[in-house]
Amino acid sequence: MPVNETFARRLKRLREAQGFSVAALAERCGVPAAEIHDLEAGRVQEPELIVGLRLAEALSVDVYFLAMGEAGVLLGRIDALEKRMTLLEWQR
């Protein structure tokens, strides 16, 4: 799992690791196969939020991980904790 892995490469690696063809993943998550091809080829740099959510669910991975890789999971959770702490401080 390369540190500098692109979204396109990560999506393809995850799909292949789970044994899905592009068509099977498309059917599983309700995203057109052509769109998945474009994502994996890097022709689409940032998918729509709903597409990312559907792909992450279909691949059974954390959405932060799908979007950002290993670092994204940790950074996303730290960000969420910081927001919760700020909210709690406001409630004092």
Image (tube, helix red, strand yellow):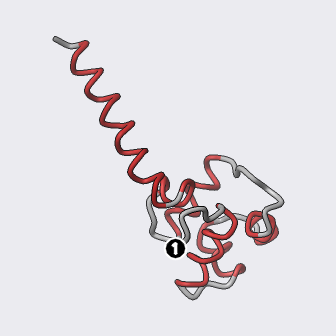
* Label 1 neighbour load within 10 Å: few <14, some 14-19, many 20+: few
| Residue at x 42% of width, y 44% of height | 76
**In-front residue for pair 24/12:** 12
Q: Percent position (x, y) of residue 31?
A: 69, 64
| Residue at x 67% of width, y 85% of height | 21
In this figure, what is the number of numbered marks? Answer: 1
40 shown above or below 71: below
Side (left or right) of 49 relative to 64? right
Q: Percent position (x, y) of residue 89?
A: 22, 16
Side (left or right) of 32 relative to 49? right
| Residue at x 83% of width, y 60% of height | 43
90 shown above or below 7: above
Tag 1, which secondary structure?
Answer: loop
84 shown above or below 15: above
Q: Tell me the quadrant of the picture where the C terminus can be found.
A: top left
Q: What residue type is labelled 1?
A: Met
Side (left or right) of 11 relative to 63? right
| Residue at x 54% of width, y 60% of height | 66
Q: In which quarter of the image is residue 37?
A: bottom right
Q: Which residue lies furthest to the left in this view?
A: 92
Q: Which residue lies furthest to the front in this view?
A: 3
Side (left or right) of 31 relative to 78? right
**In-front residue for pair 68/29:** 68
Q: Percent position (x, y) of residue 71?
A: 46, 54
Q: Percent position (x, y) of residue 56?
A: 52, 62
**In-front residue for pair 21/8:** 8
46 shown above or below 84: below
Q: Name the residue under label 1.
A: 1
